Structures are given as C-alpha cells and as structure tokens.
C-alpha cells in the first residue's frame, strides 16, 4: 500500500563523500553505516556542553542537576509484577539483530580497509568467525543461543526494500519461529529522505512479514490490558538541522526532516493500520521530550551505551510526565574498532565505555579491568530498566507497557555483542597481529545475561 507522500527532500543535503559523511556522524546508506543516533547527533551541535571528540561521548549533558530519589524495587518483586502482567514476558526482551554480514564477497567485516577472514572491522573475533548472515546454520546457532539466554524477540536492522537485510528476513523469520522467537524491526537511515517514506516502509514490513505470514512470529507486543500490537523503533529520527563535524566545521544534516514531517508520517501510518490494530507503538531514539511528542512518536527507546543508567530515572520522569513511553536498553558498554581512513579525514574513535583507566590491550590486567567494567554495566542497566518500568507510579506501568531492548546481539563493529566471541586461547596465529580484545571466556556476556533473564521470565 502506498500512501502517496511527497518524496522531495525538505532540505538539500551537502554533497559529501562517504569518508566525510562518516567523520560528521552522518549515515552512509550504501554501506549500511548508520552514523550517529539522534542523541549522538544532538551532542554535535553548537549548544552541546560536551565538545570532546567532535561529539558528546560521556553524556555529561544528560546528568540531572538535581538527582531524584531512586526507587529500589527488589528484582524478584519486579519479576513477579511483570510476569503477572505479561503472559509472554520473554518476548518483551528484544535483541538488536544485525543481518548485514556477507562473505562472498565480504561485506561489513571488511569495513574501511580490513581484510577478512583474519582481519575484521571489530575489536573482537566472533566465535563463528567472519560469517554470512544468510547462512542457515549461522542463523540456527544464533536462534539457539538467544533462546538459551531467555530472549524471545529480535529487532532486525532493516535497510529498505530489496536490501540484503530485507531479502534475508524471510529465512531469519522461518528459523527464529522454530525457536519461538518473534521479530520486529529497527528502521535504519536507508536513504537521506527516508523520513518521507517512513509510513510506507513500516506498512511494507507489517504487511509482508506480519499479515502475509498470518502473524506467525511477527512481534505483537502484549499490553497489560490483554491487547497486543506492533512496536517499531526508528534510528536517527529527531535530528538537528546542522552539526559541527570533527574539524569544527558546520555541516547541514543530510537526512534531517522537521518534526511536522514525522508527525504526518506517523499519523498516516496509524490511520492505515487502524482497521487491524487499535494502536501501533512508534518509538524514537531521542531524549528530547518536546520534539518526540511533536513528531508524533509514542515515546523513546535509547540505543546509545553512552547514555548512562545514572541518567535514566530523570529521563523516565521527563517522558512519563508528558505521557510518553520510555525504554532503556540492557547493554555492555562500547568497544568500537578504529576505522582505517584517508589521512585528510578525521574519524576519531569513541573511547571505551564505561570509562576505565588507560588501556593496554596487550596487558592481561587491562583486559580484566575492561571486562569488569562491562560486566558491571550489564548488571546496572538490567537493574535500572526493570526497576523503572516496573515502578507502579511511573507512566509505563500505568499504561501497561513494558519493553527492553538488549544492545546488541551481534553489532561487532561497536563491540556491543552478546553473541559469543572466541575464547582468547582459540585465536588463530594469523589473527594475532590484529590485537583483538577477546577475553579468556568468550561466552561470559551470554552466560551473564542468561543468569539474569531466565529466572526473571520463569515463574519458579
């Protein structure tokens, strides 16, 4: 179904090559490079307090001036409340899933000059090596790992109709269905004028992967009132019109669209789906309460690991106070690879998150410190998102809504993967020169998440 929206961009993008776009934090759709999130883009504006690295990387500007009293609801109590409200609780934990890896030729593993299979664009080598996302054996292993961890849904990183990710979706859904894992979509910046086709593209995935499959494992999220409906998350939705790049130059954001365009799209989408669903939940990746509301989104789902859990209570209060939903991701921090870029282009890597003392990845004690910091972030983010959403005094609970993304299953570029890595002892000699960050136990993130989720989603 085509809604007939004008496809003319509202702004004229500045013509930048791929390397310059990356350096400014802009997406590179042809390479499925998604650039900054809405929060990251906001950190590059002239009004942002933090200017290091050409963008905000430590989220200091998000820290509340007055820290509200934190609620300390015991996790077992949160689990009881959630299980009583939501009959399929495991489907409310959604892995961010990236089906963009290819091997013939290599795609994504070979970003910015890396040479797979031994040299990949990641700080850590996956246990499965440089795999293809279209390999049924790989998808089957992923599904088994997800089910074992207690996660019941994935959000596919979707890059437009006819893209490799779109073509691979039916196979992924077939295999995930066999493991009772449901599927929703993370709408990426697949074109600079993507906002103008947002409603049509969401309708496409709902019809193609929901309606045409008789809703076999398209994620229809349960609400506490017994209804269920689709939930879709957008990336780079609430953007500033200009940003400052890493050279200090003002750049026009090529995929910026005003909030009125997003509102028109969202309202038309809801109208088109109303004969089938009373509602569809649309989430933006923004901490700007006013613009999220003005753009017609139902709330926010934050992707960035740099938005620290210490800031979440204030954000939940701000959004909930404006009758907007909030979702914070269970995450393990950030350990991104350093791109190989032309000398005339600055592409400064983001630091390890959470902050640790000066790192030497050749030193075992440094690697242990990094793992401890990441371990603590998983626990902290798990605790905070559950406690905030289960709090009966907050808007999510009053609306009967609960949703937590897990960031991520396999975004290996950013080092956020819960997918198992190789044990350090199993790295090949040909891989040693790349100085990968693989830990002694490459499965520790998977094992930790399993220990947290399975008791929560199982009524003991």
Image (cartoon, rainbow, N blue to C red):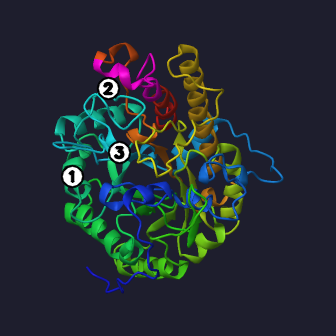
Asked if one can make out residue 180 in the rendered structure from this viewpoint, the answer is yes
Element on which disc 2 rests: loop
Crowd rating for badge 2 (residues with CA inside 10 Å; few <14, some 14–19, many 20+):
some
Report which quarter residue 216 is drawn in. Answer: bottom left
Residue 47 place in picture, x, y as percent:
70, 65
Crowd rating for badge 1 (residues with CA inside 10 Å; few <14, some 14–19, many 20+):
some
Q: Nearer the viewer, residue 69 or 51?
A: 51
| Picture layout, residue 76 above or below residue 197 | above
- Residue at image position (38%, 43%) is 152
Query: What's drawn in magenta, residue-wise?
Result: 430-447
Say which of marks 1 and 3 sits in front.
3
Say the numbered circle drawn on residue 352: none
Q: Nearer the viewer, residue 5 or 380?
A: 5
Q: Is residue 370 part of the magenta span, yes or no? A: no
Residue position for label 3: 112
Q: Is residue 440 part of the magenta span, yes or no? A: yes
| Picture layout, residue 288 above or below residue 455 | below
| Picture layout, residue 417 above or below residue 197 | above
Element on which disc 3 rests: helix
Q: Earlier in the sequence, mark 2 or mark 3?
A: 3
Asked if one can make out residue 34 in the rendered structure from this viewpoint, the answer is no
Residue position for label 1: 168
Residue 233 place in picture, x, y as percent:
45, 61
Crowd rating for badge 3 (residues with CA inside 10 Å; few <14, some 14–19, many 20+):
some
- Residue at image position (39%, 35%) is 122
């Amino acid at each position: 179904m085509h809604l007939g929206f004008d496809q003319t961009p509202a702004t004229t993008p500045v013509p930048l090559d791929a390397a310059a776009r990356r350096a400014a934090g802009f997406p590179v759709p042809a390479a499925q490079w998604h650039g900054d999130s809405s929060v990251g883009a906001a950190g590059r504006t002239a009004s942002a307090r933090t200017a290091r690295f050409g963008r905000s990387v430590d989220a200091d500007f998000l820290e509340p001036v007055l820290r509200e009293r934190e609620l300390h609801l015991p996790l077992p109590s949160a689990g009881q409340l959630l299980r009583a409200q939501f009959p399929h609780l495991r489907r409310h934990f959604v892995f961010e899933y990236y089906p963009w890896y290819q091997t013939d030729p290599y795609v994504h593993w070979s970003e910015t000059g890396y040479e797979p299979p031994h040299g990949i664009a990641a700080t850590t080598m996956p246990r499965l090596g440089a795999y293809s996302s279209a390999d049924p054996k790989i998808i089957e292993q992923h599904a088994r790992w997800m089910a074992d961890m207690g996660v019941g849904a994935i959000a596919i990183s979707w890059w437009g109709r006819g893209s490799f990710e779109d073509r691979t979706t039916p196979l992924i859904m077939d295999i995930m269905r066999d493991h009772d894992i449901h599927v929703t979509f993370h709408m990426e910046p697949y074109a600079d004028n993507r906002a103008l086709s947002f409603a049509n593209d969401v309708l496409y995935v709902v019809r193609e992967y929901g309606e045409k499959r008789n809703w076999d494992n398209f994620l229809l999220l349960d609400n506490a009132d017994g209804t269920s409906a689709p939930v879709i998350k957008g990336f780079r939705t609430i953007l500033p019109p200009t940003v400052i790049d890493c050279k200090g130059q003002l750049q026009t954001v090529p995929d910026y669209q005003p909030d009125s365009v997003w509102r028109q799209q969202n309202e038309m989408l809801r109208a088109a789906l109303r004969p089938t669903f009373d509602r569809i939940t649309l989430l933006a990746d923004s901490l700007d309460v006013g613009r999220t509301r003005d753009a017609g989104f139902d709330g926010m789902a934050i992707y960035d690991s740099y938005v620290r859990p210490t800031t979440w209570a204030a954000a939940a209060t701000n959004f909930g106070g404006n009758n907007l939903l909030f979702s914070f991701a269970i995450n393990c921090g950030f350990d991104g690879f350093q791109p190989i870029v032309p000398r005339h282009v600055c592409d400064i890597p983001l630091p390890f998150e959470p902050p640790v003392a000066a790192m030497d990845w050749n030193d075992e004690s440094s690697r242990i410190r990094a793992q401890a910091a990441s371990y603590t972030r998983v626990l902290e983010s798990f605790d905070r998102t559950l406690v905030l959403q289960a709090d009966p005094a907050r808007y999510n609970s009053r609306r009967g809504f609960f949703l937590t993304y897990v960031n991520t299953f396999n975004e290996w570029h950013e080092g956020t993967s819960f997918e198992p890595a190789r044990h350090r002892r199993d790295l090949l000699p040909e891989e040693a020169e790349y100085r990968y960050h693989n830990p002694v136990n490459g499965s520790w993130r998977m094992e930790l998440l399993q220990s947290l989720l399975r008791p929560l989603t199982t009524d003991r």
